[in-house]
Amino acid sequence: MYEQLVTLPKVSDRRGNLSFAENFNQIPFEIHRLYWIYDVPGGTERGGHAYKENIEFVIALSGSFDVIIDDGNRIEKVSLNRSYYGLLIPKMTWRKMTNFSTNSLALVLSSTEYNPHDYIRDYQDFLKVVKP
Ligand code: TYD
């Protein structure tokens, strides 16, 4: 199993819920960057690439969307629809995000700063690396 769905802590009381994540605790790496994806038009697909080094942890802070992850041998779809789930996406994993609900908000915690050279954007190139 190359994908990992992590259930984050959830502290509930009559004032509502609170969830959290810490470096090297719920998140198995040091966070170097956050980005978030929002206002995604219906029917849009995002992602469609792999990273050579970057590891990601994706949370659906609001709404829902699907993450399709592919390690070159196996393709899986994970639906994120609760803000206390996080999906760990290892390096060298092809991933796409689809089926964004209205007003969905995807928070992505990343192990590296943004580096355009870390991307593999061609699926055939990805397969050549993972299945030489
Ligand atoms: P990209 O990673 O291709 O988005 P997605 O995977 O959701 O399809 O990034 C889209 C654009 O945003 C691209 O021009 C690079 C820029 N970008 C940054 O400048 N910093 C970042 O941290 C990220 C993730 C993207």
Image (cartoon, rainbow, N blue to C red):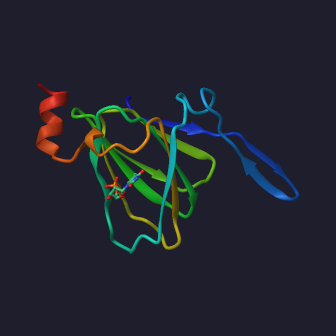
Residue 50's place in the image compared with 79, above or below, is: above
Residue that appears at 64% across and 40% down: 8
Which image quadrant: the C terminus?
Answer: top left
Left or right: 119 as drawn, with respect to 28: left
Judge left or right: residue 130 versus residue 111. Answer: left
Q: Position of residue 77 (x, y in %)?
A: 36, 48
Residue 101's place in the image compared with 115, above or below, is below
Residue at 18% over, 37% down: 126
Spot occupied by residue 60 in the image (x, y as percentages of width and height): 54, 55
Question: Which residue is pictured at 26% across the width and 41% down the height?
Answer: 117
Image: 45 above or below 80: below
Rendering quadrant holding ligand 1: bottom left
Residue 59: x and y in percent read 54, 50
- Residue 12 x, y percent position in the rendering: 81, 50
Q: How many marks?
A: 0
User: 49 or 111, which lies in front?
Assistant: 111
